[in-house]
Image (spheres, rainbow, N blue to C red):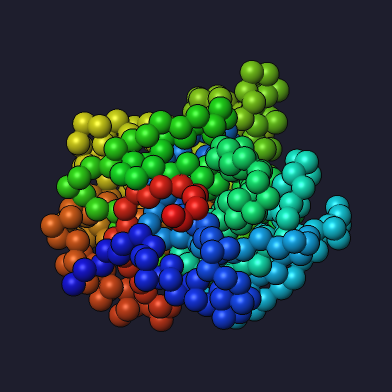
Amino acid sequence: MNRTKPLLSSTTRAALERAFQQRYGETAALIQSATAPGRVNLIGEHTDYNEGWALPMAIDRSVTVTFAPRQDRLIRVASDRFDEDTCLDLDAFNDSQPRDAQWWHYIAAVAQQLELKGHKLRGIDALLGGDLPMASGLSSSAALELATARALCAASGVPWLAQDMAALCTRAENDCIGVECGVMDQIASALGEPGHALLLDCRSLTTEPVAMPSQASVVVLDTGVRRALAQSAFNQRRKSCEGAVAVLREHDPSIRALRDAAPEQLDAVRRQLSEETFRCARHVIEECQRPSSMADAFAANDLDRAGALMNDSHTSLRDLYQVSCPELDHITDSARRHSACFGARLTGAGFGGCAVALVATVQVDDFIAQVEESYRVNHTAPFNAFVTRASAGARLLE
């Protein structure tokens, strides 16, 4: 069995364009498609909004916006996966736009941020599609934001500056949706490189490509448990981190974020912190060291070391940051029991969604079959697994 899949195929693209023509009646010459990948974060979780480091990888599953420009300022969008459509008026945006997580609110938020940056947008007709699982920890929201931004920029003649657009889409999610995420998801979706993960400094927003090992595969293990970050404890974790920084800064004013703190500095103020705040800060301070260590392990072809770092990260996320769940714990434990697995951890914000495993390529099919069998015996949530590869960032399809 082959669990890999190609990038968006010409057949899939043709189907999207046919569906677009059936809905909107545009001629084929006017139709374009913008796509943006999801991401799997190999290590460095909940470090981005603490100005630390992460090691994300854009994957070969994506959100695609097939579109054609309009002559007015309306954005008409239909979604095949939600079986819904909506119409947004660019002239009706204001500061009281709803803070919500409906799929079309992400589109409205990106358009609003582009307008606030001084870009006068044209309307578009658009059809939303793709093969990226939603609400699974693979950053479907960032992919939707970047694909939308790429389409709106193309329709309106706005220059595409990938890093700037990643920052703009992060603001859209923070200010309009109400999820206080960092920039890591959007950077990965905007700047992904084929064959490489990105060692990301979340303070400077600089990235360094890290070649993925040829003899190992990245396997996504989807628990089927879905979560909504805006309604979860995600924002509370961020507040705990900010509370720790405030106390640490009283002792050392040079500490701007948890990335600046050493473990011994945290230990010195432990009595001034709640147990939850201490745990969250300890996770972040230790996790900030893992992305560069994993990049070094890849460079040295030390997959056992890379896997051990992934295992340590999951333990920290489970016990210190407390964002795992029984399904994620079970699926990562099952993954590690297979002899071909170097390491496994939850990926994304947690509270459900996906885990990621680093697996010897020659045994990947047997690995997936064994993990699936164990998971289905113990859980009713639907299981899915697939091998993924590092992909390019947001782009127009030629």
Q: Quadrant of residue 278?
A: top right
Q: Residue at x 26, y 67 (%)?
A: 3
Using residue 193 as the reference point, say whether residue 140 is left or right of it: right
Q: Residue at x 29, y 30 (%)?
A: 296
388 vs 68, nearest the viewer: 68
Q: Residue at x 21, y 31 (%)?
A: 300
Quadrant of the snapshot with the N terminus: bottom left
Q: How many marks?
A: 0
Decide: is 11 above or below 244: below
Question: Visible in this render: residue 229?
Answer: yes
Question: Visible in this render: residue 320?
Answer: no
361 vs 153, nearest the viewer: 153
- Residue 105 is situated, as x and y percent measured from the top left of the image, at 71, 63
Q: Quadrant of residue 332?
A: bottom left
Using residue 267 as the reference point, say whether residue 334 is left or right of it: left
Decide: is 134 above or below 315: below
391 vs 52, nearest the viewer: 391
Decide: is 226 above or below 184: below
Quadrant of the snapshot with the C terminus: bottom left
Q: Quadrant of residue 5?
A: bottom left
- Residue 75 is situated, as x and y percent measured from the top left of the image, at 72, 64
- Residue 348 is situated, as x and y percent measured from the top left of the image, at 48, 54
Q: Residue at x 68, y 18 (%)?
A: 253
- Residue 306 is situated, as x and y percent measured from the top left of the image, at 28, 41
